[in-house]
Image (cartoon, rainbow, N blue to C red):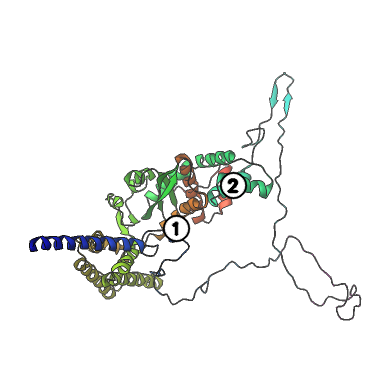
Amino acid sequence: MVVSLRAELVQTRAELVRAQAQIAQLQARLGSHSGNSDRPPSSDGLAKPAPKPRSLRGKTGRKPGGQPGHPGETLQQVATPHHRRVHRPRQCADCGRDLARRPVTDVVARQCFDLPPVSVEVTEHVLQERECVCGHRTRADAPEGIDTPVQYGPRITAIVIYLYAGQFLSKSRTAQALAELFGTPISGGTVAAMTARAAAGLDGFAELVRHKLTGSEVVGFDETGLRVAGKLHWVHCARTDRYTLIGCHPKRGKAGIDDLGVLTGFAGVAVHDAWAPYDSYTAPQHQLCCAHLLRELQAVTDTTGQPWAAKAAKAILAMQKLVTDAITAGHDHLEDTALKRHICRYREAAVAGINHTNARTSTLMKSHNALAFRLLERQRDYLRFTHDWRVPPDNNGSERDIRMIKLRQKVSGCLRTLVGAQQFCVIRSYLSTTAKHGVHALEALVMLTQGTPWIPEAT
């Protein structure tokens, strides 16, 4: 009887341990939000998670809003307005006398910025045919780009693509917007045809940007999910501060990365999160994203309260500040003593994390243990930014470039075909790259629809 009870007690204790581990894992999942995981801010919903997400950047000491020296974009009066209307007072506001012949003592100018009534202009091209004395008839050639009896011009086409790929309206809403703004009826099918023609004109652009990125010293890489034809596809991004290349592929892993065609021939520094497929490319060096790491460490603090995670995060933020301050001061290297002190704290925190997490107890502890081991094993890749100042400590630039794809899905839903998704991505690559070179989006699209897209210098 006693033996039976002891066996039952052992079994009960084992079940309790498993239940506690499962509860901890579910609590960690419930407590996951954009501040301590890879989840996007949109997944937080309308209600802010409790506790309220804290900034991982720490206090800067600066007041909110625009900083001194920021140019701002306040509406200012212009020296030469298009129209000037003079308003004269007719009679005195005090005694009522006529003021028609009285001298002007002061003026106050008030300017109103507005658009004139917009309407579509139709230009007819009449191609004359004339008969020679020899009897042969010759017809005049149509201007370049005038190919059909009735067609839309490059500026209307550029506006359509801007609304669709630049402002993320659906095809039907783009057609509706054009009809209501300019009185021009257009169908969703026409929007699709315009988009396809524009994307086809960017083959040379995409290849040149791919070549530019492959030859760059530092490139950021990222990927995100996109619903295409009712299934999950993956958008892959490679970018620098000058170029952006975005592609869509059914696979997230190496097949999708290879299809983008940048990392396969890249030999610089690849900035990315610690996702395993990126590490399968051995030619480039790696800078792992510290922003992702800080969120992972914040999740450990939120779920377990263990101090090692906060200590590691504090050391990383301190090293980032060291680099920022040194660059601002015009230095070309960090002070060895300060850097070594923070690296020592970083390593001490990682060792403490390994000692305080048992990979055998639960799935949650296993992930925390793996994180602590990764801090040590990938120290060189996490801290590369401390000695190679070409390299940013995070991959936030890639996340910003790829965020527009998620915004498009949020505004207008999934794309219906993979071809359509790829066309959308190449146009987004074009708009992002031209913006980085100071070219206005509508101006760049007009150039594209005229058959002469903006192209970066080949050198």
Q: In terms of secondary structure, where does tag 1 sit? A: helix
Quarter of the figure with residue 4? bottom left
Q: Is residue 282 magenta?
A: no
Q: Which residue is the site of mark 2? A: 174
The residue sitting at 48% across, 62% down in the picture is 46
Residue 137 is situated, as x and y percent measured from the top left of the image, at 70, 22
Residue 129 is situated, as x and y percent measured from the top left of the image, at 72, 27
Q: In the picture shown, does residue 187 fall above or below 244?
A: above
Query: What's the residue type where badge 1 is placed?
Result: Arg
The residue sitting at 37% across, 50% down in the picture is 215
Q: Rounded to the nearest whole Å, what is the CA distance between mark 2 and mark 1?
A: 25 Å
The residue sitting at 63% across, 46% down in the picture is 176
Q: Is residue 101 magenta?
A: yes
Which stretch appears magenta?
80-107
Task: Specify whether 408 is left or right of 52.
Answer: right
Image quarter in which the N terminus is found: bottom left
Task: Specify whether 196 is left or right of 236.
Answer: right
Task: Specify whether 4 is left or right of 153.
Answer: left
Query: What's the residue type where badge 2 is placed?
Result: Thr
Q: Which mark is residue 400?
A: 1
